[in-house]
Image: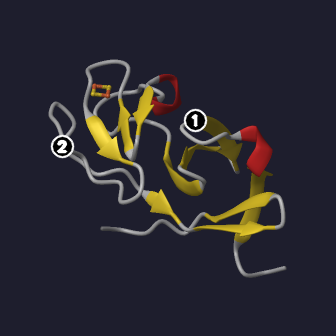
Amino acid sequence: MSDGYIKVGEIDAVLPGKMKCVNVNGRRILLANVDGRFYATDDTCTHEDASLSTGFLKGELVKCPLHGSRFNVCTGAVLDEPAEINLKTYPVRLEGKNIMIALTASKI
Ligand code: FES
């Protein structure tokens, strides 16, 4: 298949309300399950080098474990300082049990 989508995991590996970091072609991607819908963003906070997957997910919002900025995992939008830059987001689709993402980043 050459439409750019890559398998990054299976749906059972990320339960609702949970998130996980996956390595895709050397890039750390945050996979989040929000009420059964999957979203993918960069895992590294846009403020400093913190892994958002080790933070806290509440609804659509992930909170950075280092300084507490929150981001919307659906849109990538940053909500609080000190981070000021939105997260890159990636298109997600499901194929059976497989979670597929396209690494072409979308901007908001
Ligand atoms: S590293 Fe995430 S808010 Fe500072």
Q: Amino acid at mark 2?
A: Glu
Q: How many marks?
A: 2
Q: Using the image, determine if residue 30 lies above or below residue 88.
A: above
Instruction: Tell me the tag on residue 64.
Output: none
Q: Name the side, left or right, on which 85 lies relative to 96.
A: left
Q: Quadrant of residue 82?
A: top left
Q: Is mark 2 within 8 Å of ligand 1?
A: no
Residue 104: horizontal and vertical position, in percent? 54, 69
Instruction: Tell me the tag on residue 84.
Output: 2
Q: Secondary structure at mark 2?
A: loop
Residue at the spot x=48%, y=28% of the render?
51
The residue furthest front is: 35
Q: Quadrant of residue 64?
A: top left
Dot 1 crowding, Cα within 10 Å, few <14, some 14–19, many 20+: some
Residue at the spot x=72%, y=63% of the render?
100
Q: Secondary structure at mark 1?
A: loop
The residue furthest left is: 81
Residue at the spot x=79%, y=81% of the render?
2
Residue 86: horizontal and vertical position, in percent? 28, 51
Residue 78: horizontal and vertical position, in percent? 24, 46
Q: Using the image, determine if residue 22 lies above or below residue 41.
A: above
